[in-house]
Amino acid sequence: MINRRQAVQTIAGACTLAVAAGQGSAAEASPGNSVEALQSRLNPKIQDARNVAMKILNPSKAELERGLQLHAESIVFDSYGFGPRASVDGDVVAAAVDAGASAAELKDMQEEMTMTRFATDPVQEQEYREAWRASGVTCVFNNAGEEGQDPMRLLKRLARHTYTTDLLRGFVFKAAVPGDIVAAKKEDRHCYYLTGNGVPLAQQWVSVEDELKYVRVFYQLGIRMMHLTYQRRNMIGDGCGEKSDAGLSDFGHRAIAEMNRVGIIPDCAHSGWKTSLEAAKSSTKPMVASHSTCNAVYPHFRSKPDEVIRAIVDGGGYIGICCIPRYLGNSGDINALLDHVDYVIKKFGADAVAIGTDVAYTAQDSGTQRAKVPRRGKQREEFRMLWPKDDFKTTGAMNESIAWTNWPLYTVGLVQRGHSDEVIRKVIGGNVMRVIQDSV
């Protein structure tokens, strides 16, 4: 395992550093791969979030310059998140409400609008491009599946992202292999590596092989990572929201084996601790917790304890630290994010951690558009949202400080923490590149 992992690190590291080292002139010539692009012509929403984070970090001029330059030069890979989102068309949704549309239809309509309008509406497209430019992100391991195992349920978001990347392929495209991400950086484009929020199951239970037949189908459609569970228990194992954590099922072991065979990364971000531990030991290829936190820094059911992180790391994987204040705990802001990253680096090494934001930039007029939609009556809590309660109080400033468009300041913060350029490159993209290379 160690020899294989070291070999892959060498391949992926060389790939990442080659781009970083060789793009000096390209970065200067290309507006998207420059320090200027990261901090100029920011719209008010992006600038306000930037100001909040800058006030918290208060970097020196040298720290800021070094961080922004490093960010502009590097492949930046969000280990789990969402590309920028459009606003809904409030008038269209309101008309659907008046026409008697069901709650399910309205939810689906609004989700589709946020995920596709930037491909058809010029104003939304411009803001979409602005958010990408300000973030300096090369690739997002993008959520392209709704929580669950039903293949038809999982297809919807996948279809939407396929549609938008087809229409905007000159700017953002669906990557299929690791080399596509390298090419995106060189060409000053952006891309998605796609992840499904569940393992698609036939749910007929004729045989194990028949039950898992859609895993390969979804791989062929572009999915490269899958959640083993969400919050609740399923046939693979227990989710992190279950009070009892029974661990990985016999079927779960077979599902991971099929994912390993096909080339899909198992993701335990939403799995229970025992399920995560057993999955990491079961997988013959790197497994990840793509967007989680460290229980040793702040105890939360969405975190991972050291034992689980160690098992993931020993298998060649990483833990991605998310940008959700209530999971980060303590200050809940950009410093809390950096505290979790620091902990993993010091405890497990620089190869063990990435940043998986789990947040999205939303268009500036989202609030105005949603205000046009008539309010509906009280609704039942969705099954996927049945999480244990906590008493953490999230503030607007916390969310703003770790906004998705503040990605360049995550890098600046790592500079402030005293990390070398090599370590920072691993955290902001190199480790994800290594794992996807090892999963091909």
Image (cartoon, grey):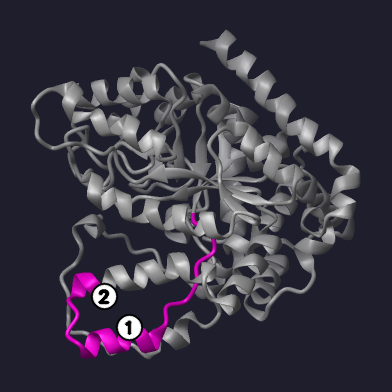
Q: Which residue is mark 2?
A: 106
Please name the amino acid that badge 2 sits on: Leu
- Residue 63 in sight from this viewpoint: yes
* Residue drawn at (54%, 28%) of the image: 435
Say the numbered circle drawn on residue 265. Answer: none
Q: Does residue 287 appear left or right of residue 56 in this picture?
A: left
What SS does tag 2 mark? helix
Image coordinates of residue 256 in percent, x first then y, are 31, 24
Q: Position of residue 171 (x, y in %)?
A: 65, 57
Type of amino acid under label 1? Val
Q: Nearer the viewer, residue 377 or 369?
A: 369
Q: Dot 1, crowdedness within 10 Å: few (<14), some or many (≥20)?
A: many
**Residue 55's spot in the image, x, y percent?**
71, 69
Q: In the image shown, does 76 or 61 lie closer to the viewer?
A: 76
Q: Tag 1's secondary structure?
A: helix
Residue 98 among those drawn in magenta: yes
Q: Which residue is mark 1?
A: 93
> x and y percent of residue 125 in the render?
59, 71
Stretch in magenta = 82-106
Does residue 341 lie above or below 391 as drawn? above
Label 2 neighbour load within 10 Å: few <14, some 14-19, many 20+ = some
Please give left or right for residue 203 compared with residue 158 in the image: left
Between the C-alphas of marks 2 and 1, the distance is 7 Å
**Residue at 91% in and 45% down:** 25
Q: Which label's residue is closer to the chain start, 2 or 1?
A: 1
